[in-house]
Image (spheres, helix red, strand yellow):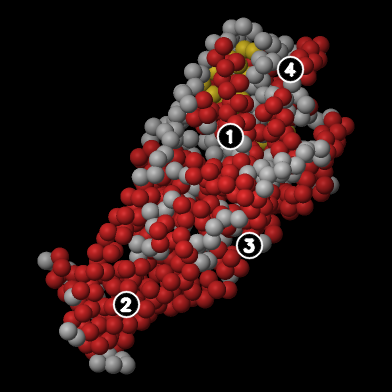
């Protein structure tokens, strides 16, 4: 079995199993802890609407706070958009998704993907440097914060190297890229990347909790 | 309306002496940790678990905190204030605890002592960070659990503990009980203000606070004038008048439950349909939003903040106001637990505009308002006075920017704290009661 066969075969299968079961375990485990029912009379009965509104609202800039968090806010937008474009609209990625899902979609030109990949990489490196230099971030950061950035940076670097055929045979570069993505899958349920799934229930409960008191959250 | 300066100075002096004679509780460090952990285990629920799991350590919450803003000291980042709770959760409750435990340091007595400063002096539970968090994490609730854990570990700061134990054991606050209330009611009667006390049956029960009785009787007199004008069947109850809840403030649940139960029992006993809370933000949170949960059943009466009640009566056309502002301009300070935590945001503004005042909104307001800097009992903790003064400077800057003649608020604790800050800074702007403003403009 070649390295590429391993990356495409058992490594991919096991990393996906760990990803799916790990995420389900962590989400259900945290949500199943007992909670007392709130017996206070709500100001309004719009918990569901308020919850969804907050999911949307927390993705938007806010008046009073915006001036203080502009850097985090816009690097956040740029990084997530660049990542999604690179992952979802690169031709070879779409072929992979098609082999799994049975259907594909149009790809973007490689030149655009190269730019979005470079943007995502540059922002992550900037955020990593900021985490080591900003007093608040240095104080509150733990191993998870650094590991989570690194496991996302490495697939982008290996992807760019594979795309550019730099440093080794293409098959080897592709295998390394796949293995780095699989490392991300394995880490995903254990670190803070879980926010990808939990952001929505967390925002929802903020919206419904404050909403029942009549406050827009 | 103005506050008696002698009474104000005496009140400040009484704060300085708080807790001086408290005996040491004699708890060992090990016992403190055990108690804090027990409380954390009881209090953490699925909502908090999701919040703790979701945090990405972005640090944006720091930018919402008035203490961080005032000092730029990273230790005031709200997420850092819940670090012991997060560690406890990861070791004991997280679905991934089997993996996290070996890599997560256990709590120590030293941790609890260190976080006492951050949780009581470095946080007023104002909840501004709740509005900032991009993940929607309710940090103020987590910090409240930290307070509850520290309270059970015997680590409530001495001044606050003195007041909390007084309310728990004596049912008085600052030494104010039924006798002091009766004296005030008599004095008001002599001034021609009719304040019904201990009626056996009535529709409306009005609560007050020790601080109103000692310092801001103008607010209670104003409430009486408004209710009398409305012809309401109302009363104060000498066995259940105190709206202050030192249990909520300190994190001591026994005190919180006792203070709440006393009000519920007394108000229910006289058949109240409405209980009106005085101008005290945390009291609104304690009874309106946490009261039913403390007594384990829905409250048999409606709970309204006085500003909320007045606005409702005005809206319904039962209360007539005359616009007699004489061109005075005002700005409004939203008490955190009445506004951001409580939802009473539009009503005070509606009333100020009904009075014909030139209302000027401060830069931060409503759900995004900065705390007065001394909420949640912080203004009685003497050690934190320099920090509070720095936070007051934020408020002063914002109030000055409006160029308003007066600051109006609807919380006696905010009022005291702003007055202390103003007194220290030699700042002259009056800090007035909203209900006082309304009572001064009642139409005949």
Q: B410 or A164: which is nearer to us?
A: A164
Residue B294 x/y as whole percent: 52, 29
Residue B201 shows in this picture: yes
Distance between the alpha carbons at the discs numbered 3 and 4: 45 Å
Mark 3 secondary-structure assignment: helix
Image side of residue A57 versus residue B338, left or right: left
Mark 3 residue crowding within 10 angstroms, few (<14) / some (14–19) / many (20+):
many
Residue at image mark 4: B178
The residue positioned 81% from the left and 49% from the top of the image is: B425
Q: A198 or B363: which is nearer to us?
A: A198
Residue at image mark 1: B253
Label 4 marks a residue whose chain is B
Image side of residue A17 versus residue B222, left or right: left
Residue B361 shows in this picture: no
Residue B153 x/y as whole percent: 63, 44
Mark 2 secondary-structure assignment: helix
Distance between the alpha carbons at the discs numbered 2 and 3: 34 Å
Q: B48 or B282: which is nearer to us?
A: B48
* Nearest-to-viewer mark from 3 and 1: 1
Disc 3 to disc 4: CB gap under 8 Å: no
| In the image, farthest residue toward the left | A102
Distance between the alpha carbons at the discs numbered 1 and 2: 50 Å
Q: Which mark is residue B74?
A: 3
Mark 1 secondary-structure assignment: helix
Residue at image mark 2: A180
Distance between the alpha carbons at the discs numbered 2 and 4: 71 Å
Image side of residue B80 versus residue A33, left or right: right
Q: Quadrant of residue B266?
A: top right
Mark 1 residue crowding within 10 angstroms, few (<14) / some (14–19) / many (20+):
some
Label 2 marks a residue whose chain is A
């Amino acid at each position: 079995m070649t390295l590429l066969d391993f990356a495409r075969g058992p490594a991919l299968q096991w990393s996906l199993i760990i990803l799916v079961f790990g995420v389900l375990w962590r989400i259900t485990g945290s949500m199943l802890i007992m909670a007392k029912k709130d017996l206070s009379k709500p100001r309004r009965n719009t918990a569901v609407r308020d919850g969804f509104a907050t999911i949307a609202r927390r993705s938007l800039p806010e008046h009073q706070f915006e001036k203080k968090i502009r850097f985090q806010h816009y690097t956040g937008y740029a990084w997530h958009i660049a990542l999604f474009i690179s992952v979802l609209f690169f031709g070879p990625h779409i072929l992979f998704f098609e082999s799994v899902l049975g259907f594909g979609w149009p790809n973007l030109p490689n030149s655009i993907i190269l730019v979005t990949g470079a943007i995502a990489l540059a922002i992550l490196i900037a955020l990593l440097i900021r985490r080591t230099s900003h007093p608040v971030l240095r104080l509150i950061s733990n191993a998870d914060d650094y590991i989570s950035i690194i496991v996302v940076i490495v697939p982008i670097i290996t992807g760019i190297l594979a795309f550019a055929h730099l440093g080794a045979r293409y098959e080897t570069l592709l295998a390394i890229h796949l293995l780095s993505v699989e490392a991300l899958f394995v880490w995903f349920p254990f670190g803070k990347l879980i926010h990808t799934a939990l952001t929505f229930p967390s925002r929802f409960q903020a919206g419904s909790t404050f909403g029942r008191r009549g406050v827009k959250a | 309306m103005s506050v008696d300066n002698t009474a104000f100075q005496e009140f400040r002096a009484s704060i300085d002496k708080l807790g001086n004679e408290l005996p040491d509780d004699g708890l060992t460090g090990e016992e403190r940790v055990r108690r804090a952990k027990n409380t954390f285990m009881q209090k953490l629920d699925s909502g908090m678990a999701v919040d703790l799991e979701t945090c990405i350590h972005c640090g944006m919450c720091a930018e919402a905190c008035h203490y961080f803003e005032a000092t730029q000291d990273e230790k005031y980042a709200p997420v850092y204030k819940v670090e012991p709770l997060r560690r406890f959760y990861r070791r004991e409750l997280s679905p991934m605890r089997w993996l996290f435990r070996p890599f997560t340091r256990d709590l120590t007595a030293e941790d609890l002592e260190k976080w006492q400063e951050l949780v009581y002096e470095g946080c007023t539970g104002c909840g501004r960070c709740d509005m900032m968090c991009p993940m929607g994490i309710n940090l103020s609730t987590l910090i409240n659990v930290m307070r509850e854990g520290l309270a059970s570990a015997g680590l409530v700061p001495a001044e606050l503990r003195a007041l909390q134990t007084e309310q728990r054991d004596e049912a008085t606050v600052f030494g104010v009980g039924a006798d002091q209330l009766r004296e005030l009611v008599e004095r008001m009667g002599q001034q021609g203000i009719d304040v019904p006390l201990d009626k056996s049956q009535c529709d409306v029960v009005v609560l007050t606070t020790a601080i109103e009785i000692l310092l801001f009787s103008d607010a209670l007199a104003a409430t009486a004038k408004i209710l009398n004008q409305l012809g309401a069947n109302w009363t104060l109850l000498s066995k259940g008048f105190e709206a202050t809840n030192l249990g909520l403030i300190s994190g001591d649940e026994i005190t919180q439950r006792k203070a709440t139960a006393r009000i519920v029992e007394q108000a229910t006993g006289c058949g109240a349909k409405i209980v009106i809370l005085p101008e005290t933000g945390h009291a609104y949170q304690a009874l309106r939003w946490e009261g039913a949960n403390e007594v384990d059943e829905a409250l048999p009466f409606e709970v309204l903040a006085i500003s909320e009640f007045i606005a409702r009566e005005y809206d319904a056309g039962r209360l007539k106001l005359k616009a007699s502002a004489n061109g005075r301009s005002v700005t409004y300070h939203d008490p955190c637990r009445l506004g951001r935590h409580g939802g009473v945001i539009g009503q005070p503004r509606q009333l100020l505009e009904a009075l014909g005042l030139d209302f000027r909104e401060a830069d931060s307001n409503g759900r995004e308002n900065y705390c007065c800097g001394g909420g949640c009992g912080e203004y009685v903790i003497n050690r934190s006075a320099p920090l509070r003064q720095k936070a007051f400077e934020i408020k002063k800057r914002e109030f000055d920017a409006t160029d308003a003649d007066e600051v109006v608020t609807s919380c006696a604790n905010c009022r005291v704290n702003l007055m202390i800050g103003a007194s220290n800074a030699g700042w002259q702007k009056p800090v007035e009661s909203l209900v006082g403003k309304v009572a001064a403009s009642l139409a005949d």
